[in-house]
Image (tube, coloured by chain):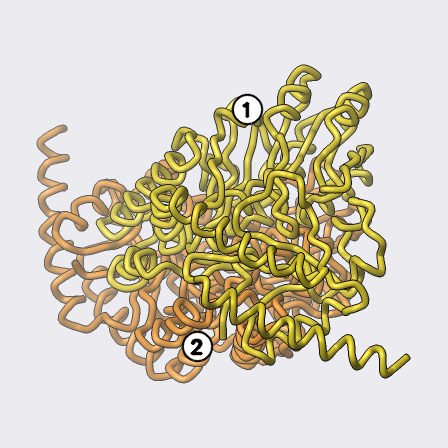
Chain colours: A orange, B yellow
């Protein structure tokens, strides 16, 4: 099996697994315990906090560890809304469901949700941000890189507009970290979500990077861990792995990016030859993601056939892959629903190479040809 | 170092680590992905769901995986309260902070918190439950076994009273599982929390066992995982480890209990000889926990001295061990605050033996003697 679904999750880097192993074995202490086992665990969490902060040019004290990106996004949106007087929350139409749903849930407590416009390539219309911010706005959340298209938003520019209107601005950078430079200070946001399992780290660890002047109400309360913002025994091995993965991500960022851009170009050159529609073209994209469709060829079916042929790809965001609705991201970009149902995502990663891309293209071409033949027979 | 703090956290059983390893290595798929990597992960999560359910005599469909016990307790209390008309929530005064705090936070949304009375051994006064339930009550949450004293509550009797008044009843069974029989059906509760890292499983996995007729509003929303009750990419390795740990816990329950009761008796016989006060005596306790105090000997200091001598014990619940306040559990039991500050907890586990208990007792006796000498010199 060739794995081409790195935006869904990544394999644990062997170095990361090695860093975690002591904490899965002999160093099993609860980081809140006062004895030697506890202080060793606490020291490991603190070191990881420094590694995570360094990877995004933040301060260790700005790192709030959570169990995942979904939790971190919920913590910011619900936690900030609980502190603010209800007003408007501004989001983009291409947000992950773990931003979009919490935002829409705020409408029960008097908030109004304003969804921004995006262009045909999936870029947020900055003029529409200006229009949206004419209404009193408490919160803005716009992602840095999209999980489906890989399209990168100009978050710093949106943050500037948001700050001018005294709104709190958050970005979901889960798909950006490790694939492009992610600088908390330069992005100028109040809060940012990053996650370990998208950067060759473990599932079970993520962080909300948070400007300490922002007050949040915890969604998980109890023993008062993470400065009271996230109670619960720290998942020490996963946090240690997150720290190690952050270091690796930064070390490898540039060479990996160069290699993946070349692989994607190899892929998309042929896709264009096969008359596929490629989404997000013309926009800045993270290097590893290609989202495309063959008109008339159902995306779900194509994923299943490719799986049978030994290639793991996605038909949309894995997080909502139990849904058969066309991607809301594509619909917001003005893609015809019939074409949106044909969408397939290839997201490349560290272990992929040109041979794998060529093998994938051969398999894809054969399957598409066969599916076209079958659909023409059916008519 | 001899570890005597199994209520804070437990080492990962080597069998559990082995069960997890494939999912930390080659089986890294996102359980929501449709390809082979994803379906393998989904199958592993489903198998763990069956193992967890079987361990507590519940149905797999009643298992809602969360990142930890704290999250599961928050999910029940906040999630149920969001569905119900505000009324009264009844809790005991010996609940873990991750039940007590969410309960008290409900007062902001119109709920009234009623804290039950406990006797000198820390047992909930069932007549006070009857009195409390005369007020219209939406929610009741009382723990099964206490993290500090090990005292076991008669949750089934409380559940019967709660159900008669149409209240939803939840129990935090985190410290009970693996130390006593925990039967979701017999306890007759609507919801129950259990956690992996207290039963030789990994940090990062826990479950709310939930009667499907109970409607909760998720506190973490997004992709709709766990029947919409807990969104976020499943922590597959931790969930697999949780399942494996549940199987082991049930297999070993009786022999381990017999062994630990004998070890604790060996410990407490000598503690009584040294004129220590033992808390919770006279009540039913889980087999592994001994909570005691030497009047005039500060608990925190004793923990530090014991750590230096090579023994890891706790002065209170690890989850709030950054606090220097006397234990609210002991205060509720009517223990004098001065004596409560002397409390030390030994919680035994699988790898402990009689030699270790004897070594511990020798060290304890020497340290207590020295501390008494020093305090008499100071006077």
**Which quadrant of the structure image shows residue B238?**
bottom left
Q: How many marks?
A: 2
In this orientation, does residue A278 appear? no
| Most foreground residue, B144 or B244 | B144
Pointer 1 residue: B188
Q: Residue at x 66, y 68 (%)?
A: A189
Is A103 left or right of A271, judged from the image as shown? right
In x, y percent, where is residue B285? 59, 43
**Which quadrant of the structure image shows residue B113?**
top right
> Regarding mark 2 in the picture, which secondary structure is present there?
helix
| Image height of B240 relative to B57, above or below | below
The disc at residue A244 is 2
In x, y percent, where is residue A142? 58, 58
The disc at residue B296 is none
| Most foreground residue, B272 or A170 | B272
| Image height of A21 relative to B277, above or below | below
Is B111 left or right of B199, judged from the image as shown? right
Q: Residue at x 63, y 28 (%)?
A: B169
Q: Residue at x 59, y 32 (%)?
A: B216
Which chain contains the residue that carries disc 2? A
> Regarding mark 1 in the picture, which secondary structure is present there?
loop
Residue lying at the far top of the rendered structure: B164
Q: Residues within 10 Å of mark 1 (few under 14, many from 20)?
A: many
Specify whether disc 1 shares its chain with disc 2. no
Is A162 left or right of A102, judged from the image as shown? right
In x, y percent, where is residue A288? 34, 68
Residue lying at the far front of the rendered structure: B273
User: Distance of mark 1 from mark 2, alpha carbons?
Assistant: 45 Å
In x, y percent, where is residue A11? 31, 65
Q: Residues within 10 Å of mark 2 (few under 14, many from 20)?
A: many
Which chain contains the residue that carries disc 1? B
Tag 1–tag 2 contact (CB < 8 Å): no
């Amino acid at each position: 099996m060739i794995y081409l679904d790195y935006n869904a999750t990544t394999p644990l880097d062997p170095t990361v697994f090695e860093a975690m192993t002591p904490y899965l074995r002999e160093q099993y202490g609860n980081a809140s315990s006062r004895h030697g086992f506890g202080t060793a665990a606490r020291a490991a969490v603190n070191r990881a906090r420094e590694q995570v902060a360094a990877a995004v040019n933040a301060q260790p004290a700005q790192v709030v560890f959570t169990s995942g990106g979904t939790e971190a996004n919920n913590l910011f949106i619900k936690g900030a809304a609980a502190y603010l007087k209800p007003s408007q929350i501004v989001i983009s139409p291409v947000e992950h469901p773990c931003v979009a749903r919490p935002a829409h849930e705020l409408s029960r407590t008097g908030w109004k949700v304003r969804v921004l416009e995006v262009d045909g390539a999936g870029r947020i219309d900055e003029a529409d941000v200006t229009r949206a911010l004419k209404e009193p706005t408490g919160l803005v959340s716009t992602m840095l890189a999209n999980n489906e298209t890989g399209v990168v938003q100009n978050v710093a520019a949106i943050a500037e507009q948001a700050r001018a209107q005294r709104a709190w601005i958050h970005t979901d950078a889960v798909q950006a970290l490790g694939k492009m430079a992610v600088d908390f200070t330069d992005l100028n946001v109040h809060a940012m979500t990053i996650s370990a399992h998208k950067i060759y780290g473990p599932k079970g660890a993520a962080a909300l990077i948070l400007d300490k002047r922002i007050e949040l109400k915890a969604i998980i309360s109890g023993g008062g861990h993470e400065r009271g913002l996230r109670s619960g025994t720290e998942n020490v091995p996963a946090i240690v792995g997150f720290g190690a993965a952050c270091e690796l991500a930064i070390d490898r960022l540039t060479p990996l990016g160069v290699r993946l851009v070349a692989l994607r170009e190899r892929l998309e050159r042929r896709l264009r030859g096969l008359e596929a529609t490629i989404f997000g073209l013309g926009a800045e994209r993270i290097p590893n993601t290609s989202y495309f469709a063959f008109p008339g060829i159902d995306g779900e079916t194509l994923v299943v056939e490719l799986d049978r042929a030994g290639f793991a790809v996605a038909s949309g965001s894995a997080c909502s892959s139990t849904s058969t609705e066309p991607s809301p991201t594509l619909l917001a970009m003005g893609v015809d629903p019939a074409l949106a149902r044909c969408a397939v995502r290839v997201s490349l990663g560290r272990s992929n190479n040109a041979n794998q891309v060529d093998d994938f293209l051969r398999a894809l071409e054969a399957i598409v040809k066969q599916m076209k033949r079958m659909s023409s027979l059916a008519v």
